[in-house]
């Protein structure tokens, strides 16, 4: 039976890790992730987990230790933020290339410079093409739920890829919320026992890992990673359905919020979706046909699900909490536009992008009201006055 307790987002992920009881966790503190590992270290010190807690001297070492542990056959986890993830960058690619089912919490924070410890999605977006699966969380409850599901997704034989579970720094990581926590036994039955097919400590079946891979096979190995990402879409939906039966909480690739007859829609990720839902409810109460599409799974990107969700809208706005310098719009906008312009897409839909929230700048409900008002104007006039705008920016 579920317990109802109050936890910060960091504590929620640490609680999920306690219940998972991974074999190895590598820890290195960085704001705003530090509290997460502090709490897990308390669980370790109190004997509540059997985990080998490896305290390292940098994030590069944290990911290296996690890769080594996973290759040896352990269920391995870690966590980081911002510059820490950037320092892991070299090894992050190795984790995906070696098909190691590592789970890592990323507490989103802006990248330097200038130095900034507050939330945006620049850190996670830097790894969007690394081969990791990326799950975004709207609140502490989803950060907890995603952490549990990430283990089962990563270790599925059809996938065998590492998974990032993201939560917005300070907005989720340090905010206390009401959470429903599963029983320890329920969690352990859900994630199951990790039994790797091949591992370095299996001396009866020796194999080589990380060899030189030049023109002869490198291309084919990348193709296998691509296939694994595509397989992950179905696996994520299967795991989400299983988790919904267990917890009562729906959590697919995307969430359609009041989209049944929406002619104007916003597409967003992370904690902003909670604010957007409030605005959608306010506008719906005034009789306006508006909705929200929350992207929970960013990699692999659920193109077909997104196209279906936007099939009836006349205009859509994408909210990006990161910049893709030199590109037209942010990274989420690029994926949404690609979906709309695909063979089965909807090229007639008017689409615009807004960059917002960089370095922790607040996004207020009135900003989102303005977005829906802009979409109303686009539908009324048929004209798109700008393709990329900014919310909350002093100009």
Image (cartoon, rainbow, N blue to C red):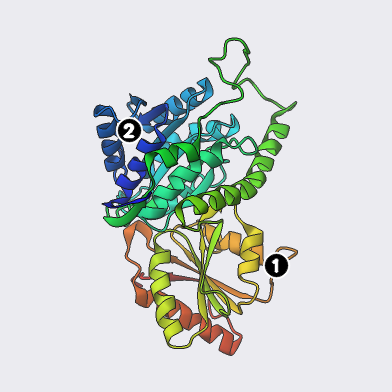
Residue 268 in view, yes or no: yes
In which image quadrant can residue 254 be found? bottom right
Q: Position of residue 27 (x, y in %)?
A: 34, 31
Using the image, determine if residue 70 lies above or below residue 257: above
Q: At x 43% / y 82%, what residue is drawn?
A: 283
Using the image, determine if residue 179 lies above or below residue 258: above
Q: Which residue is mark 2?
A: 28
Q: At x 62% / y 12%, what residue is drawn?
A: 206
Give SS at disc 1. Answer: loop
- Judged left or right of residue 63, residue 47 is left
Q: At x 34% / y 71%, what residue is drawn?
A: 364
Q: Which residue is mark 1?
A: 345
In which image quadrant can residue 160 be found? top right
**Residue with the most extreme front position:** 1
Residue 80 in view, yes or no: no
Q: Position of residue 378 (x, y in %)?
A: 56, 83
Work out whether residue 356 or residue 248 is closer to the camera in this orientation and state it.
248
Q: Position of residue 19 (x, y in %)?
A: 38, 37
How far, Cα to Cα, is label 1 from label 2? 44 Å
Give SS at disc 2. Answer: loop
- Judged left or right of residue 265, residue 208 is right
Q: Residues within 10 Å of mark 1 (few under 14, many from 20)?
A: some
Using the image, determine if residue 109 lies above or below residue 95: below
Work out whether residue 113 or residue 242 is closer to the camera in this orientation and state it.
242
Q: At x 47% / y 29%, what residue is drawn?
A: 75
In which image quadrant can residue 314 be found? bottom right
């Amino acid at each position: 039976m579920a317990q109802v307790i109050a936890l910060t987002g960091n504590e929620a992920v640490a609680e999920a890790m306690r219940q998972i009881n991974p074999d190895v966790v590598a820890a290195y503190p960085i704001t705003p992730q530090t509290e997460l590992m502090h709490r897990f270290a308390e669980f370790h010190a109190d004997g509540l987990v059997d985990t080998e807690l490896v305290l390292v001297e940098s994030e590069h070492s944290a990911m290296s230790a996690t890769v080594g542990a996973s290759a040896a056959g352990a269920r391995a986890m870690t966590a980081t933020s911002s510059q820490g993830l950037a320092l892991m960058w070299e090894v992050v690619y190795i984790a995906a290339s070696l098909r190691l089912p590592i789970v890592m919490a990323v507490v989103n924070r802006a990248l330097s410079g200038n130095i900034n410890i507050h939330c945006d999605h620049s850190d996670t977006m830097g790894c969007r093409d690394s081969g990791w699966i990326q799950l975004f969380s709207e609140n502490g409850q989803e950060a907890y739920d995603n952490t549990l599901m990430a283990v089962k997704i990563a270790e599925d034989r059809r996938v065998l890829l590492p998974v990032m579970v993201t939560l917005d720094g300070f907005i989720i990581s340090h905010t206390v919320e009401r959470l429903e926590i599963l029983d320890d036994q329920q969690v352990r039955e859900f994630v199951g026992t990790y039994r790797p097919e091949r591992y370095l400590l299996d001396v009866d079946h020796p194999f080589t890992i990380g060899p030189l891979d030049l023109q002869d096979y490198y291309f084919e190995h990348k193709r296998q990673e691509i296939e694994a990402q595509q397989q992950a879409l179905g696996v994520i939906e299967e795991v989400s359905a299983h988790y919904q039966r267990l917890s009562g909480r729906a959590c697919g690739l995307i969430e359609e919020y009041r989209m049944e007859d929406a002619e104007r829609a916003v597409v967003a990720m992370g904690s902003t979706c909670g604010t957007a839902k409030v605005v959608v409810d306010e506008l719906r109460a005034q009789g306006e046909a508006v909705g929200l599409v929350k992207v929970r799974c960013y990699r692999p990107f659920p193109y077909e699900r997104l196209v279906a969700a936007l099939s009836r809208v006349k205009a859509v706005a994408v909210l990006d909490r990161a910049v893709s310098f030199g590109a037209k719009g942010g990274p989420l906008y690029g994926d949404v536009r690609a979906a709309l312009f695909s063979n089965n897409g909807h090229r007639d839909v008017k689409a615009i992008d807004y960059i917002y929230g960089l370095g922790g700048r607040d996004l207020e409900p009135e900003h989102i009201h303005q977005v829906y008002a802009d979409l109303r104007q686009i539908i009324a006039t048929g004209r798109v006055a700008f393709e990329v705008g900014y919310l909350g920016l002093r100009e």
